[in-house]
Amino acid sequence: MKHRIVLSAAALVGALLAGAGLVAPAALAVGGKAGTFDVADAMARGRYVVSIGGCNDCHTAGFAMSNGRVAEQDWLAGDALGWQGPWGTTYAPNLRAYFQAIDEDGWIQAARTREFRPPMPTPSMRAMSEDDLRAIYRYVRSLGPKGEPAPAYAAPGQQVAGPVVRFPAPPR
């Protein structure tokens, strides 16, 4: 009886979360077969994941500083704002150009294996389901090419032009 109550409660919570749009629809759920969902659903899911994942905060110029008031047509075109810390200075690349130059499986491979410099939240990206990564790819590709390449990485101590956000060294 106790197990039935727990399972019933779990099913109820799952139904409530799904109804509120807080969990992936079954076609996009973790463990589903990649590529089996409708393209329109994948792009809607990709837009959602990009939005909640904070991708625009760094990869869209002015997004964080304007409280998200950047037109969607301008999203993910990279930024010249540098992120400087003990690792050097990194720049959020133009994802729209990047995704035009790589195929979907190449993106999945990069998302799973590449070591990105800070402040890229690599552990968060690696925790995403394959379906979410594919949805991101399809959404960003649907935006089409736009913008210029971000400035190149600068090693620690190398002077850079333009504004930077400075991170302190980690505590010892």
Image (cartoon, rainbow, N blue to C red):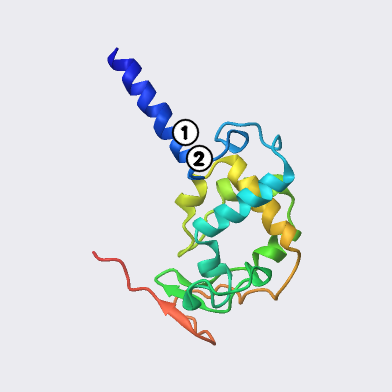
Dot 2 alpha-carbon crowd within 10 angstroms: few under 14, some 14 to 19, many 20 or more:
few
- Describe residue 159's horizontal placement relative to residue 146 as left or right: left
Which residue in the rendered view is the most extreme toward the top? 1
Residue appearing at x 74%, y 50% in the figure = 103
- Describe residue 46's horizontal placement relative to residue 125 as left or right: right
Residue appearing at x 68%, y 55% in the figure = 139
Residue assigned mark 1: 15
Query: Could you say which is closer to the camera, residue 82 or residue 16?
Result: 16
Residue appearing at x 63%, y 74% in the figure = 150
Which label number is shown at residue 150? none
Locate residue 129, reporting x and y percent: 55, 41
Q: Quadrant of the N terminus?
A: top left
Which amino acid type corresponds to the residue marked 1 in the rendered image?
Ala
Which amino acid type corresponds to the residue marked 2 in the rendered image?
Gly
Q: Secondary structure at mark 2?
A: helix
Query: Could you say which is closer to the camera, residue 77 or residue 165?
Result: 77
| Residue 84 figure quarter | bottom left
Locate residue 4, reporting x and y percent: 35, 16
Q: Quadrant of the C terminus?
A: bottom left
Locate residue 7, reporting x and y percent: 37, 22
Q: Secondary structure at mark 1?
A: helix
- Describe residue 135's horizontal placement relative to residue 30 as left or right: right
Locate residue 128, reporting x and y percent: 52, 45
| Residue 6 figure quarter | top left
Residue appearing at x 48%, y 45% in the figure = 22
Which residue in the rendered view is the most extreme toward the bottom? 161
Q: Calculate the distance from the C-alpha at mark 1 to the C-alpha at mark 2.
A: 6 Å
Query: Could you say which is closer to the camera, residue 51 or residue 78?
Result: 51
Assess whether mark 2 and mark 1 are in contact (beta carbons under 8 angstroms).
yes
Residue assigned mark 2: 19
Dot 1 alpha-carbon crowd within 10 angstroms: few under 14, some 14 to 19, many 20 or more:
some
